[in-house]
Image (tube, rainbow, N blue to C red):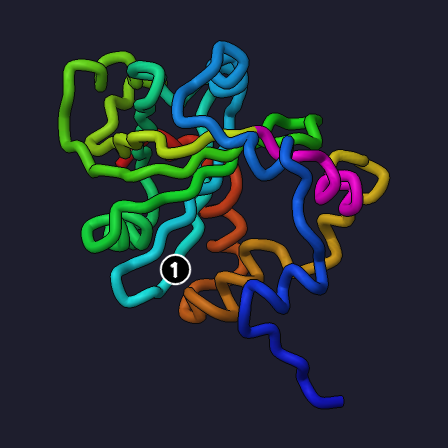
Amino acid sequence: MDVVEVTSEEQLRELIGTPLPRTANKARATLHPLDKDWLAAAPFCMIATSAADGSCDVSPKGDPAGFTLVLDDSTIAIPERPGNKRADGFRNILSNPHVGLLYILPGRSDTLRINGRARIVADAPWFDQMVVKGHRPQLALLVEIDEIFHHCSKAFLRSALWKQETWNTGAVASRALIAKALERPDETIEELEEYYGAKYLEKLYKA
C-alpha cells in the first residue's frame, strides 16, 4: 500500500476536523492558582526541545513533588540533578530557546502542558530553595511561559497506564541486559546488575 502523506493544514483538518472553541482557546499565558497546585503536586515532567537545525530531544525530569519552583505568574524554574552529562536538551536550548513541558501526576490521567522560552541559569538566589538531600543544583532551567493549559485524559485512559494489572515489566530485557548489549559490552551482567541496583539509588543526588 502506498503511503498517503498529509502535506497541508487544510488536508489535516479535512481528516481530523476542527477543535471546539473551548479547546482551541483554552491556552493561557499566566499561571492560575490551580496550575500552581498542579506544579506543587507534580514529581515528574517531560521537557521537549529542538535545536536550530530541527533535531529534537525529550528528556524526563523527576524529583520530590513540587520540584518546579514558581517564581511568578509567568515564570518557573526546574533544577538540574546529576545525570549522564549528555545535556541534549540544554545544548538544544543554547540555539533555540523554545521548550514544551508535560507535567504528570501519578494516578492522574489528565496532564498539564506548558510551552515557553527557556534560559540556562548557573546560579540565582532561589537555587537555595531547590536543595534536595543536600544537593544544590549546578544548573536550572528558567522558563518564561508563553502558554499553559490542561490536557484531557484520553491517551492515559487508552493506554491504561496506571492500571497495575496491565503492567508487564518483564516484557523486555532488564536495564543491565540492555546496557550489556548496547552500551557497556566489556562489563559482566553481574557487574551491571550491581551498578543498577541499590548503589544506583545511592547516587541519585551525587555528581
Residue shown at the point (22%, 15%) measured from the top left:
126
Q: Report the front residue among 45 and 8.
A: 8
Q: Is residue 65 visible?
A: no
Q: Position of residue 111 (x, y in %)?
A: 60, 31
Q: Residue furthest right?
A: 165
- Residue 205 vertical placement versus 57 (above, below): above
Task: Specify the quadrant that holds the C terminus.
Answer: top left
Residue located 20% across and 38% down the image: 120
| Residue 155 covered by magenta stretch | yes
Which percent across, then down, holds residue 82?
31, 37
Answer with left or right where residue 15 lies relative to residue 82: right
Q: Is residue 121 above or below residue 135?
A: below
Instruction: Choose between 134 and 86: the one closer to the eye.
Output: 86
121 relative to 70 in the view: left or right: left
Q: Quadrant of residue 145?
A: top left
**Residue 159 visible in the shown view:** yes
In magenta, the rendered stretch is 150-161
| Residue sitting nearer the eye, 186 or 106 | 106
Q: Is residue 83 magenta?
A: no
Q: Label 1 crowding class (10 Å Cα cut-off): few <14, some 14-19, many 20+?
A: few
Q: Secondary structure at mark 1?
A: strand
Left or right, 198 with reference to 106:
left
Position in image of residue 24 (x %, y %): 58, 39
Instruction: Report the amino acid beneath label 1.
Output: Cys
On the image, numbered disc 1 is attached to which residue?
56
Q: Residue at x 60, y 73 (%)?
A: 6
- How far across and down, in percent of the image, does residue 12 sit? 63, 64
| Quadrant assignment for the N terminus | bottom right
**Residue drawn 68% across the image and 34% down it:** 152
